Image (cartoon, helix red, strand yellow):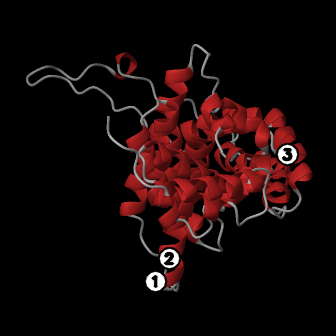
């Protein structure tokens, strides 16, 4: 996990909305659209007084992996050294590496790097598949977990049979990010300020993911709480989090808060910038309007 905090490798939350585009927002309810490394299995121990079973009867050890050849080592090094800006090349070489060396002990790192490349390329389906494989290989990969927490709710179809399953998977990823960051050691030589910013970036993605999960479950209060935390923690908040925070605040009749959230989501340049500005004006009018007379 230390490596994930080194060299600003975290993925900015705001980049997710830009990289994946509005196609992924189609999963959100129509209301929002119209509103302004794996642990080995433990071997079973014999009961007290019971003889140790012969080795053949015990859980067999996993088959030894073949030694890494120089060709595989060179291929992995060439892939790993590719800068993040070379997304198409990362995808091509990563997919080729996995096809050629399907049992490589480097596959966890390859899947993780492909997740970021698929994110930047807007290839959501491939991102989710690679992310799930990366987490199976390395359950504590903080960067992959954070991306998956924020992306999965945007890709699920509310009418699909696995709707609840995907939301639960996103929630598990988000909560594991929060758990991991609470005990994340600070790398030697990193300033407290930079370390806090890195952790908050991951936490912002996790809380954005939880906000999306609660939003999709129609839990307005829960989504508002999570989006509020996300936008306060992340150094580069996701404008969609601000927008849905505003939507939730409006439902709770917190029009001044809604106006502020919509104003924030209207500042960055993105596809819903004009919608955010219009919603901010409408919420401001509602905030200044006299309360409706009770019947």
Q: Are marks 3 and 2 in contact (CB under 8 Å)?
A: no
- Please report the residue visible at 56 percent of the width from the left and 60 percent of the height from the top: 284
Front residue of 249/240: it is 249
Q: Residue furthest top?
A: 161
Structural crowding at the residue carrying mark 1, measured as other residues with C-alpha within 10 Å and reported as few (<14), some (14–19) or many (≥20): few
Give the quadrant of residue 219.
top left
- Asked if disc 1 and disc 2 are in contact, CB closer than 8 Å, the reply is yes
Whole-angstrom CA distance, mark 1 to mark 2, is: 5 Å
Q: Which dot, 3 or 2, sits closer to the camera?
A: 2
Indicate the secondary structure of the residue bearing disc 2: helix
Point out the tag, 3 or 1, that comes first from the N-terminus.
Answer: 3
Q: Residue at x 64, y 45 (%)?
A: 108
Image x and y of residue 237, in percent: 60, 62
The mark nearer the N terminus, 3 or 2, is: 3
Q: Is residue 141 visible?
A: no
Task: Report which residue position mark 2 lands on.
Answer: 195
Q: Residues within 10 Å of mark 2 (few under 14, many from 20)?
A: some
Which disc is residue 276 wearing?
Answer: none
Label 3 – label 1 distance at C-alpha: 34 Å
156 w.r.t. 65: above or below? above
Q: Secondary structure at mark 1?
A: helix
Give the number of the disc on residue 192.
Answer: 1
Return the residue at label 3: 91
């Amino acid at each position: 996990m230390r490596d994930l905090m080194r060299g600003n490798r975290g993925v900015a939350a705001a980049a997710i909305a830009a990289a994946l585009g509005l196609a992924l927002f189609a999963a959100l309810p129509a209301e929002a659209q119209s509103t302004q490394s794996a642990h080995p299995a433990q071997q079973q121990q014999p009961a007290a007084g019971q003889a140790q079973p012969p080795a053949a009867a015990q859980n067999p050890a996993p088959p030894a992996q073949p030694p890494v050849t120089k060709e595989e080592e060179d291929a992995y090094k060439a892939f790993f050294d590719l800068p993040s800006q070379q997304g198409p090349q990362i995808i091509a070489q990563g997919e080729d590496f996995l096809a050629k060396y399907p049992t490589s002990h480097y596959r966890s790192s390859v899947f993780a790097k492909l997740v970021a490349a698929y994110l930047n390329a807007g290839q959501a389906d491939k991102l989710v598949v690679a992310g799930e494989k990366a987490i199976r290989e390395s359950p504590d990969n903080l960067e992959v977990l954070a991306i998956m927490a924020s992306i999965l709710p945007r890709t699920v179809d509310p009418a699909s049979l696995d709707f609840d399953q995907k939301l639960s998977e996103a929630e598990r990823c988000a909560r594991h990010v929060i758990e991991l960051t609470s005990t994340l050691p600070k790398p030697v030589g990193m300033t407290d300020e930079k370390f806090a910013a890195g952790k908050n970036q991951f936490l912002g993605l996790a809380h954005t993911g939880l906000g999306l999960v609660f939003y999709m479950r129609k839990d307005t209060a829960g989504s508002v709480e999570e989006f509020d935390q996300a936008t306060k923690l992340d150094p580069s908040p996701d404008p969609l989090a601000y927008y849905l925070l505003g939507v939730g605040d409006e439902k709770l009749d917190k029009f001044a808060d809604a106006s502020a959230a919509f104003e924030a989501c209207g500042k960055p340049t993105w596809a819903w910038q004009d919608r955010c500005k219009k919603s901010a004006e409408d919420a401001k009018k509602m905030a200044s309007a006299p309360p409706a007379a009770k019947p």
